[in-house]
Image (cartoon, rainbow, N blue to C red):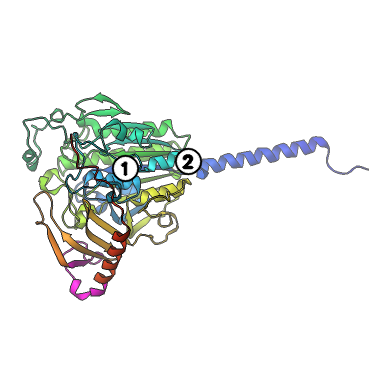
Amino acid sequence: MKTGRPFSTINKSLFLFVFFIGMFLVKAQNNGERPPNFVIIFADDLGYGDLGVFGHPTIKTPNLDRMAFEGQKWTNFYAGASVCTPSRAALLTGRLPVRSGMASNKQRVLFPDSKNGLPSEEITIAEQLKEVGYRTACIGKWHLGHKEQFLPTNNGFDYYFGIPYSNDMDKLSGKVYSDYWKRPNDSIKTEHFNVPLLRNTEIIERPANQNNITKRYSEEAIAYIKQNKDKPFLVYLAHNLPHIPLFASKDFLGKSARGLYGDVVEEIDDGVGKIMATLKEEGLAENTIVIFTSDNGPWLPFENNGGSAGLLRAGKGTTWEGGMREPTIFWSPEKIRPGVVSDLGSTIDLFTTFSKLAGATIPDDRSIDGVDLSGVLFEGKHSPRDTMFYYRGTELYAVRLGDYKAHFITEGAYGQFGEREEHKTPILYNLNQDPSEKFDIAKDHPEIIERIDSLVKEHQSKLIRGKDMLAERE
């Protein structure tokens, strides 16, 4: 006598097995089994103290505040440099800008008549992610070369929409920079700056209408997310503001108690909220990592037109804390462990962190300065970063090791905070106890100075400097 189930019953059982396995796989994919999406929102000249969640009393940033409460607020997070061009190069390449040549002692940033841009041999985070199937978009300020060979679309980005350099460039005659030292006034117009707005490599508007540029950048980011939601994506949204000149759309103009600067920051915050809402509506939030930070500290000489470094010393252009420590928030609901992180991190680390999360191979033919922060984000581990190098141009001015920061050279910027001074004995601060860098403790800790000196010697012995790409102008 034959035993077992009839053939039809076996077919039915096999069908059900295959069906449920298929449903399980679909559910797994929908639950974020595919590589995570990445959204980098990069402000320009935003100060450490310019967000509500970082202590500003009158600038209202409810969306960034919520992002911090739901995600991680990093209080010791650094830009790769204290001015625009080298800072952006550091973020995109995961390397100190002195290595790529995107730092100079002659020209601190690129200009509309600059000859060069980001070297083609540099590998950007967009190129890394494209290798593993990502769609990539750069929206906003680029500032790594305005010629076609240097634009985002030749550096790993599938799509570009933005102004290729700072919004105060291509200034028309009749206005001088001293105008911006005053309180905001109606005589400053968007048409005074003949900056181009590009879509990919084509100029679609000149001068760009900066009155609504923040709003348009956020809308472009949202549209790209919706159009590319079926594949892993990277959106690098680099706002031109609150770099001066300041402009806000009608919905935000005059809204903030902080004045025009506050209007600008509140409009950026509104865009962040809409991006977060889009990610939730499209079912992408749980598998998307969003980071908000800034390229460098506030441009302090411009008084009410500039931001605030809060309790930190100095601002943009300097290697004091106010020049490079930035307000930073990571967000990914149900993935990132909510909390306040006081460990060290840097925009330089995004290259390594995102590459590893996406399954991309870290290049082994060059020095990569970034470390992987995923253990901090998802597992509550301590950051593997314990050092920070503060370069001004191609010179190393200061080094942080753990709690301590030693200044070998100090110098102000834009007429503030003093002339250049080289210190025979470095100035030393414990930044956890003295984030304002007020109390020099070098004489009490010669062993710390000795450790940092050894670190510097080791770093410089292996440093290969890139050719200066900023100095030449046409």
Question: Which residue lies at the image location 10% right of the left edge and 33% below the top edge?
Answer: 188
Q: Nearer the viewer, residue 31 or 381?
A: 381
Residue 132: image tag = 2
* x and y percentages locating residue 48 in the rendered image: 23, 52
Highlighted range, magenta: 425-447
Q: Is residue 349 magenta?
A: no
- Indicate the secondary structure of the residue bearing disc 2: loop
Q: Nearer the viewer, residue 29 or 323?
A: 323
Callout 1: 10 Å neighbours few (<14), some, many (20+)?
many
Q: Nearer the viewer, residue 10 or 153?
A: 153
Question: Is 126 positioned to the left or the right of 453 in the image?
Answer: right
Residue 193: image tag = none
- Indicate the secondary structure of the residue bearing disc 1: strand
Q: Is residue 439 magenta?
A: yes
Q: Quadrant of the C terminus?
A: top left
Q: Quadrant of residue 236?
A: top left
Q: Nearer the viewer, mark 2 or mark 1?
A: 2
* x and y percentages locating residue 326 in the rendered image: 26, 52
Q: Quadrant of the N terminus?
A: top right
Q: Quadrant of residue 27?
A: top right
Q: Which residue is mark 1?
A: 41
Reading the chain from its start, which is encountered first: label 2 or label 1?
Answer: 1
The amino acid type found where label 2 is placed reads: Val
